[in-house]
Image (cartoon, rainbow, N blue to C red):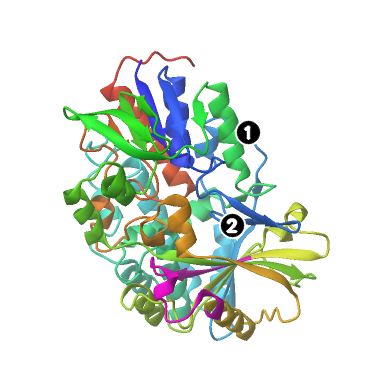
Amino acid sequence: MAEVSVIGGGVGGMVSALLLARSGHEVRLFEQLPRLGGKLAEHRRDGFTFSLGPSLLTLPGVFRDLGVRRELVELRELCHYRFADGSRLTAHRDPLRMAAEVERLAPGQGARWRAFHAWARGCLEASTRTFFAGPLTRPPSEARLSDLTAVAPGRTLAGLARRSFTDRRLRQYVARYATYAGSNPYQAPAALGCIPAIEHDHGGWYVPGGLPTLADDLARLLEEARVEVRLSARVCEVVAGGGRVRAVRLADGGEVGCDVVIANTDAAELYGHLLPDRRRLRHIAALGPSSSAFLLLAGVEGRTEGLAHHSILFSADYRAEFGDLFEHRRPPRDPTVYVGCASVDDPSQAPEGAEAWTMLVNVPARDPSRWPLSPQAYRDLVLERLAERGHDLSGRLRFVDLFTPADLRERYGAWGGAIYGGAYSGPLAPFRRPGNRGPRRGLYLVGGSVHPGGGLPLVAMGGRIVADLVNRDFPFGKATS
């Protein structure tokens, strides 16, 4: 039996801790915040509840396999898109309805969407056999030679969009999937185009009470597996010697010996502070940070006719928007705005007769003190853009609370506030991310900044990958279930 210390109680840390405890290892989990879940968090005020992190669950089977049995609600409409010219597109869960909707928006493009969806499905199948199956250092036995070409190697996501559609609005729709990884579609690999297959073939799901309740379910499973969870316990150092990890040191001065350390932290935080490693830190810096987020959490008076659970209001010039984000490193002057309103389907998220709006804009991973506008001024700009696109909230706002890259950095130790660690830049970007095995025996990494990437299902897959690695490297745990 190995003694395992998990640093960080995000989803990846919880999943790896759970699986290792079930395998017979002695597991302790240290979380610096007073609640488990990491970015799977919420903000409450005056009877309103807002999700600060993920707002849509995909591949729910990943969590069912862990023992999560919470009721899920499938969304028949995944998202409403509004383009700069005022035209609209509803992304239906059903692929046939989606193709018909694309044809309505842009005659002649419905067949192209079906071909795009078929490509995405093949890309997802290839990725499932290879990229999602385990660490990059071990070729999976199920891999096929054709998997190398199924992911359109060498092509960017924007290039895939140009190849797939002639309508500029649909090209913008495809390019948007780069934001799922906090990346620039004009540099990110085409493989991110597999996401529509995840959404349209496996569905998008909402958890009544808000997605952060998934963290509560995982916490109960940890308790059942007898994982020792220490909240409000910040780890300040990974102690190593003789080529292996030996302990974790806590900010309060305590030290806990262990055979295994699983860092569910930003990889830059691990190699910059917890276990300094200049070479690996330079490698991470070379990737460049992913984007961050600017959140407006608004209590809105009254009900909005036609408001969807998820809406995207696109900018007029996507290339200029991403130029602002990744070249000029400033908040976009004409931002795309995501609007999430869970209270449309879940009355528990807002008082009667009101709505809880989460508005998200992609911004650079950079301290807001270095922005050309203050956060308050940028809030006003976002609300103005929202009004121009059909959602004028003048006179309806009870309050607007802000959540900035500085909050992400301070709460989670995220590199500059980057949501996903390094950006996906270049055709080999997925293979340049930090791996799951660290440079010392017994050191492992999990979470959105390392393989296989960010998002609820991927960090959960990462937790399983790390648990498998530990069981392989320390093969004396005895299965208990």
Residue 126 badge: none
Residue drawn at 46 percent across, 57 percent down? 408
Tell me the kind of residue under disc 1.
Arg
- Residues packed near mark 1 inside 10 Å, few (<14), some (14 to 19) or many (20 plus): few
411 over 315 or under it: above or below: above
* Local secondary structure at mark 1: loop
Going by the image, does 363 lie left or right of 211? Answer: left
Residue drawn at 83 percent across, 65 percent down? 353
Tell me the kind of residue under disc 2.
Asp
Residue drawn at 56 percent across, 60 percent down? 96
In the rendered structure, which segment of residues is drawn in magenta? 358-377
Q: Is residue 366 magenta?
A: yes
Image coordinates for residue 465, horizontal then vertical, percent: 35, 35
- Residue mark closest to the camera, 2 vs 1: 1
109 over 295 or under it: above or below: below
Residue under label 1: 69
- Write down the quadrant of residue 94 in the picture: bottom right
Separation of residues labelled 2 and 1 (CA atoms): 25 Å
Image coordinates for residue 80, horizontal then vertical, percent: 60, 69
Residue drawn at 59 percent across, 57 percent down? 93
- Write down the quadrant of residue 36 in the picture: top right
**Farthest right residue in view:** 352
In terms of sequence position, does the residue under pointer 2 or pointer 1 come before the other?
1
Which of the pair 444/417 is nearer the observer? 417
Residue under label 2: 94
358 over 374 or under it: above or below: above
Q: Is residue 32 magenta?
A: no
- The quadrant of the picture occupied by the N terminus is top left
